[in-house]
Image (tube, grey):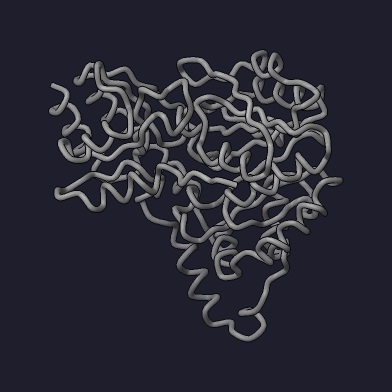
Amino acid sequence: MDYETPLFFHVMSYATEADRDVVDMVSGNPDWGSPPGIAEGLHEYADLGGEDFQYPPSEGLAELRAEIAARRDVDASQIVVTNGGGEANYLAMARALERDAGDEFLLTDPVYPYYPGKTKMLGATARYVPVADDGTLDPAAVRERASDDTAAIVVNTPNNPTGAVYDQATMRELVAVAEEYDALLVSDEVYDHFDFSGEFTSALAFDSDHRVVTTAYSKTFAITGFRVGYAVFPPELVDVAKTRHMLTNVATTRPGQYAVLNALHDTDPDYYAENRKLLESRVETFTDALDAADAEYTSPDGAFYVMARFEDYPGTLSNVERLVDEAGVAGMPGEAFGESRADWFRFALVTPRVEEAAARLADYFD
């Protein structure tokens, strides 16, 4: 089977090899630092030795799963701790196909590129549901495209790349559509701590055997390199997911889980609030510059991405490279996220140089 290398790697390599200074707005690596509990947890773990340096339980440390279960109001037996959100999504999408209730995944357009990649890897078929200009997803549009072939409806809220946040009514209806067509709603909620609107609602708010929630601590605690995430499955689906996880990865990093558990216990709510405030400020700074450049753009209600379109300058890969060479700003081409925004760019606001990047873009398009 042929796999396409994600465009992220190409753009990041191109920016790194550029002959000038470049502001990286490609990757979603938070720059604001982890809470103290992460490093403190690692120091504590380093002193344990012995059995604590060996394989953890495949489904995750019991203490971490219990903490997650208490916070999410689910049973710990429903939780599989995974190698980041990527594996959590893989397990959920694979589980949807293993139910023999269809072989098609409904994805949004624009879409996070790894969902179509996993769809192809799993041998499923992708069918796309367009979203509104502001990123809003209409459940009626999902229902219109759903069928007996629908194995899963895969959504991401807060959304990458649009910044849309799906509210309670939307999530309730998405769960209902999944139930109606005997599909799984796979709700990727990795940006749940970056909701500026106050409207975010987890799919876990609705009791259903037709929804799986995936997430990770990568963005929440600014630890993208730790690879600690988890999925919450309905009770009747979790055992096979645990087996696939064991066969694929054996287990997830023990020191990473230990550090995350420590941070969950010790992190003050102000940490999350301050990071949201920082991002809201960056959104304002960046979109002010886009106004100065007469660009059309999305105003995110969550996550930390802005999509923009410049007149007579479509968001192709070649124009991304031109922005790197001529403006010193690296973004992502819209074509990486589907057909509907192929002439847009996507910028990640996880750099302390957002103001500098904004000024460069405003000057370039002046």
Outermost residue, bottom side: 50
Task: Please tell me whether residue 4 is drawn above or below residue 365 in the rendered image.
Answer: below
Residue 196 seen from this side: no
Which residue is rendered at x = 73% and y = 52% of the image? 79
On screen, residue 68 versus residue 267, left or right, reads: right
Task: Please tell me whether residue 208 is drawn above or below residue 296 in the rendered image.
Answer: below
Q: Nearer the viewer, residue 110 or 174?
A: 110
Q: Quadrant of residue 83?
A: bottom right
Task: Please tell me whether residue 89 is drawn above or below residue 360 in the rendered image.
Answer: below
Q: Quadrant of the C terminus?
A: top left
Task: Please tell me whether residue 214 is drawn above or below residue 41 in the rendered image.
Answer: above
| Residue 313: x %, y % from top left | 25, 22
| Residue 34: x %, y % from top left | 42, 57
Q: Nearer the viewer, residue 40 or 110?
A: 110
Q: Nearer the viewer, residue 83 or 93?
A: 93
Outermost residue, right side: 236
Residue 191 seen from this side: yes
| Residue 340: x %, y % from top left | 46, 20
Which residue is rendered at x = 53% and y = 46% of the image? 3
Q: Quadrant of residue 148?
A: top right
Which residue is rendered at x = 80% and y = 54% of the image? 77
On screen, residue 274 versus residue 69, left or right, reads: left
On screen, residue 182 versus residue 153, left or right, reads: right
| Residue 351: x %, y % from top left | 30, 45
Which residue is rendered at x = 36% and y = 46% of the image? 10
Q: Quadrant of residue 125?
A: top right
How many numbered discs? 0
Outermost residue, front side: 1
